[in-house]
Amino acid sequence: MGFTEKQEALVNSSWELFKQNPSYSVLFYTIILKKAPAAKGMFSFLKDSAEVVDSPKLQAHAEKVFGMVHDSAIQLRASGEVVVGDATLGAIHIQKGVVDPHFVVVKEALLETIKEASGEKWSEELSTAWEVAYEGLASAIKKAMN
Ligand code: HEM
Ligand code: ISQ
């Protein structure tokens, strides 16, 4: 079965909850750096600060990542596949030294952040919907990295 209307709706509603609170962007980075401390130096907007602090830049980057996964859910529902619009994404990630295991770290951080943001609305079904949308997007980016 393809990506369902229900799954798209679950991703939509929790994306709205994520956007409402900038602290989820901070949480997202914090989880990533806890799992992969060495990734800190990869991010231009993080490498010079001792702590993960809230900043408009940080928030914009995190929102972009979550927004792209949200968009990937819409694409999966509409066409069954994910197309990455930004042709430079593959090159950016190669240049920053991103490797496959990093994608697992970011996925786990994304799912933990969504769990926090959705609160009592969280369910396995909601989490799986985000995971499927993320995996579709991640494979498209990895393909662009080859
Ligand atoms: C840059 C998205 C996975 C590390 C970017 C950019 C986008 C993006 C849109 C361009 C700059 C920006 O606006 O932030 C994504 C998406 C991913 C993904 C949608 C997964 C589906 C990863 C992974 C890593 C990573 C797994 C490794 C930890 C970076 C770094 C930059 C970057 C270091 C450069 C940031 C900077 O210093 O400006 N990514 N990314 N990304 N990404 Fe990713
Ligand atoms: C991956 N790529 C770009 C930006 C990001 C911000 C936070 C976490 C992961 C990211």
Image (cartoon, grey):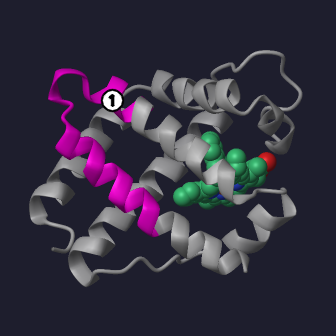
Q: Position of residue 126 (x, y in %)?
A: 22, 43
Residue farthest toward the top in the current orientation of the protein? 51
Residue 60 versus residue 39: which sits nearer the camera?
A: 39
Horizontally, residue 54 falls left or right of residue 7, namely right
* Quarter holding residue 132: bottom left
Please tell me whether residue 17 belongs to the stretch shown in magenta: no
Q: SS for tag 1?
A: helix
The quarter of the image that holds ligand 1 is bottom right
Q: How many marks?
A: 1
Q: Amino acid at mark 1?
A: Lys
Seen as rendered, the residue at the extreme left is: 6
Q: Which range of residues does the magenta coloring cover?
A: 113-136
Image quadrant where residue 70 sits: bottom left
Q: Quarter of the image for the C terminus: give it.
A: bottom right
Q: State whether residue 9 is above or below residue 3.
A: above
Tell me the chief SS of the magenta region: helix
What residue is disc 1 on?
115
Query: In front: 136, or 8?
Result: 136
Residue at point 69% right, 28% down? 33
Residue 27: x and y in percent read: 53, 24
Q: Position of residue 41 (x, y in %)?
A: 87, 37
Q: From the viewer's perspective, tell me whether residue 29 is left or right of residue 97.
A: left
- Left or right: 41 in relation to 73: right
- Above or below, comparing residue 144 to residue 31 in the picture: below
Residue 65, above or below 68: above
| Residue 143 visible in the displayed image | yes
